Amino acid sequence: QVQLQESGPGLVKPSETLSLTCTVSGGSITSYYWSWIRQPPGKGLEWIAYIYYSGSTNYNPSLRSRVTISVDTSQKQFSLQLRSVTAADTAVYYCASYWNDFDNWGQGTLVTVSS
Amino acid sequence: SSELTQDPAVSVALGQTVRITCQGDSLGSYYASWYQQRPGQAPILVIYHKHNRPSGIPDRFSGSSSGNTASLTITGAQAEDEADYYCNSRDSSGNYVLFGGGTKLTVL
């Protein structure tokens, strides 16, 4: 069973860049696409992006201009960068494995955007 | 269409059957998956590829689809089924991933 663990700062200042990393264990990083999903407090899920181990990517059009997803197969990690954040980017950020559905999820990490 | 539409809230009496629906133009072409999210927890996959259950998911959970509507049915709802449920699929172009807005299920 694949396990995922998010890591990164829990507080980011407005206009700065949010950076998160997800570490994959218990499975091969070549077996899935790897994705980021977020959930603002009290709201629903929003898909952000996914990446394949080869580096092929796909982004939510509404976030594409501010987001970069990357993968480091040697470390079994993939990462998210979200630039120029505002309070609207405050959310729990989840990493997940994806192959037509999200079958393994990390526990999520709350990122608050505030000065 | 670039949306998946769910009813915001549904309730069911303990032990009864409830259907949660998800509507979207893309569902005529792409399978839906369903996720259960209990308060303070990460979502878990309960139905994939329209009607398949991952191991460990009780068989009271079932999925179906007709036209542009996907459905999650819980037959004999239990107290522990009280949660938010989200559908997930692709947009009409097939290029992007979508989530429905979620349905809050209350078990009375």
Image: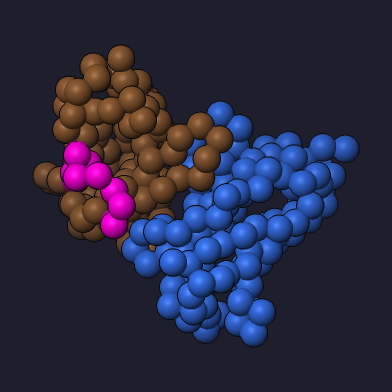
Q: Nearer the viewer, residue A107 or A43?
A: A107
Where are the magenta residues, as a range? B54-63
Question: Where on the picture, by quarter, is residue B91?
Answer: bottom left
Residue A64 belongs to the span the image colors magenta: no
Say whether residue B70 is left or right of residue B33: left
The answer to which of B83 and A20 lies nearer the viewer is: B83
- Residue under the point 24% across and 53% down: B53
Picture coordinates of residue A21, whole percent (x, y)? 68, 64
Q: How far across and how far down the image is residue A3, in percent? A: 52, 63
Is residue A31 among what the camera can see?
Answer: yes
Pinpoint residue A96: horizontal percent, then vertical percent: 50, 59
Check the image and name the residue furthest to the left.
Answer: B66
Letter of the blue chain: A
Q: Colour of chain B?
A: brown
Camera-side residue: A25 or A75? A25
- Residue B31 visible to an observer of this rendering: no
